[in-house]
Amino acid sequence: MSGFETAAFLTARIDKFGGPESYNHYAVGWAHAMDTPYQWTKQVASHWGGTRNGMVIHWPKGIKATGEIRNQFHHVIDVAPTILQVAQLPEPYMVNGVGQVPIQGVSMAYSFDDAKAAERRETQYFEMVGNRGIYHKGWTAVTRHRTPWILTGEMPPFDDDVWELYDTNKDWSQAHDLSKQMPDKLHELQRLWIIEATRNGVLPMDDRGAERFNSDLAGRPVLVRGNAQILARGMGGLNENGIINIKNKSHSVTAQLSVPDGKPCEGVIFSQGGFGGGWILYVKGGQLRYCYNLAGLEKYVVSSTQQIASGEHQVRMEFAYDGGGLAKGGTVRLYIDGNAVGSGRVERTLAMAFSLDETSDVGLKRGSPIAPDVPTENNAFTGTVQVVVIETAVKDEVSHLISREDLLNILMARQ
């Protein structure tokens, strides 16, 4: 959302920083500062600032040395072999009848009581979103392909990336680039990166962001398959990926409600996301409402012209996506018992994710608020949300209702 968060935009909201209406993230300067003395930051897998971390190993009964430092190079894939060795467990070659890919790490246990032991991991490749590097016997060859906080513009060709060379035996902070003084050494490590990347399935590289993040475009396995999902009352605390993907496509949300006599119809029917982005179907003052929260920057609210009376009702929201690419807008239509009761526009949407830490819930909203008129607490639906059906293959139905037969078909299709 770099087009929104200009200096003027942020300055106008500076008094809200750190409060409940902010989704704070440290600035670029702090990202660099927290990785001092290394170069670059997380997501930049080439330089130590994006990969190197301290590790503490505590095992009083198995390690004689105390309070000592080990400098042997190791990688996260070495943790599992270490645990298996010290626990005297064999590497599992079969789990529940499924053959396992052999563990490629090496145990670190040899260094526990020998600070000067020769390191046993001599080579390790790195790659993330095109940023790549190779470690070999104290030498590193690295290249930064993209900068994490620059989200727009064309990515440079991989062949145009500039490689750097460091002798981390002497220059452990990667401060002195030796690529021009030692081109043969650089080429040797570049060839080694190609070998390791090929062996580990890194190639071909793909630096597309939105496309790879979108499971529909990438063809990545997902938790919820098909084009419909049924959620029962009481379900909640679900990760975003535990809900069928409704981004960049037309979809509908249908809920079966029970509204008791003499009690105002109020509260959340279904919610996904939070203040930093998401959507919510709810009732306010008896009116059915839908709110789409665009990254906390814009909120689009559509309300019904009629109120929901007591009794059994089926409410529905249909989102007709404009199409023509990612993050486009759409038209929202609301229905009560199959009757059209409201419509409105969502001018733009989020293409990849709503939130990294919010949940999806039936009958209430946990966490931070999505809609401006839904309280953070005491927002549960005053009646009962019997069932919620989310569909991404929206049919042009005259009734705009889901029959019991349709519900049964959706359930049986997911067996």
Image (cartoon, rainbow, N blue to C red):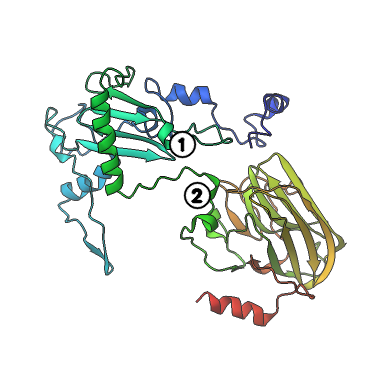
Who's the residue at 58% across and 63% down the image? 235
The N terminus sits in image quarter: top right
| Residue 178 horizontal side relative to residue 216, left or right | left
Residue 182 lies in quadrant:
top left
Asked if residue 239 can be seen in this view, the reply is no
Residue located at (24% from left, 26% from top): 184
Q: Earlier in the sequence, mark 2 or mark 1?
A: 1
| Residue bearing the label numbered 2 | 212
Q: Quadrant of residue 394?
A: bottom right
Q: Are marks 2 and 1 in contact (CB under 8 Å)?
A: no
Residue 310, given in percent of the width and then of the height, sits at 81, 70
- Residue 230 in the image, given as x and y percentages of width and height: 60, 69
Check the image and name the residue furthest to the bottom. 405
Is 410 displayed left or right of 35 in the figure? right
Q: Which residue is mark 1?
A: 157
Q: Quadrant of residue 261?
A: bottom right
| Above or below, comparing residue 163 to residue 375 in the picture | above
Distance from label 2 to label 1 (Cα)? 17 Å
- What amino acid is labelled 2 in the image? Arg
Assign a secondary structure to mark 2. Answer: helix
In this view, the mark in front (2 or 1): 1
Q: Which disc number belongs to residue 101?
A: none
* Residue at 59% across, 36% down: 152
Mark 1 neighbour density, 10 Å: few (under 14) some (14–19) many (20 or more): few
Query: Which residue is at a point 19% across and 35% down the rendered structure image?
Result: 122
Residue 294, given in percent of the width and then of the height, sits at 68, 44
Nearer-the-camera pick, 249 or 8: 249
